[in-house]
Image (cartoon, grey):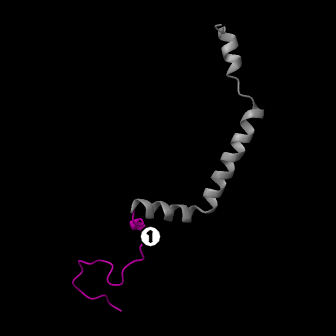
């Protein structure tokens, strides 16, 4: 038995009563990931052997311009 195009579309209908529980579960998972983002990121870096981003390093002590030949004046 072959369904008519209208019957096929009606069979594929997904209403709010079916989508809301799925979206609720996805929102819960996303919320937990956002709360523990630094922990998740640390685990991800450890698993894939990635280092921390370069921009988060504290500035090195010394002259601001390493090519400067004179000591900084006080």
Q: Position of residue 30 (x, y in %)?
A: 63, 52
54 within the magenta span: yes
In the orientation shown, which residue stands out farthest toward the left?
Answer: 69
Neighbourhood count class around disc 1 (C-alpha, 10 Å): few under 14, some 14–19, many 20 upward: few
Q: Is residue 69 left or right of residue 31?
A: left
* Residue drawn at point x = 36 percent, y = 80 percent: 60
Q: Residue placed at 66% from the left, 55% from the top? A: 31
Query: Within the image, what quadrant is residue 59 found in?
Result: bottom left
Image quadrant for the N terminus?
top right
Q: Position of residue 18 (x, y in %)?
A: 74, 33
> In the figure, 16 relative to 56: above or below?
above
Q: Is residue 70 above or below residue 20?
A: below
Nearer to us in this view, 54 or 52: 52
Quarter the C terminus occupies: bottom left
Q: Count the labels in the image.
A: 1
Q: Look at mark 1 in the image and give the residue it sits on.
A: 56
Q: Is residue 71 above or below residue 4?
A: below
Residue lying farthest bottom? 74
For the residue pair 45 and 53, the one nearer the viewer reads as 45
Please report the bounds of the magenta region as a residue range. Answer: 50-74
Quadrant in the rendering for residue 7: top right
- Magenta stretch: dominant SS? loop
Q: Is residue 67 magenta?
A: yes
């Amino acid at each position: 038995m072959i369904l008519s195009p209208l019957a096929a579309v009606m069979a594929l209908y997904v209403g709010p009563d079916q989508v809301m529980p799925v979206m609720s579960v996805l929102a819960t998972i996303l919320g937990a990931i956002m709360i523990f983002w630094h922990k998740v990121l640390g685990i991800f870096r450890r698993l894939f052997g990635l280092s921390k981003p370069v921009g988060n390093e504290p500035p090195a002590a010394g002259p601001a311009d390493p090519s400067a030949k004179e000591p900084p004046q006080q």
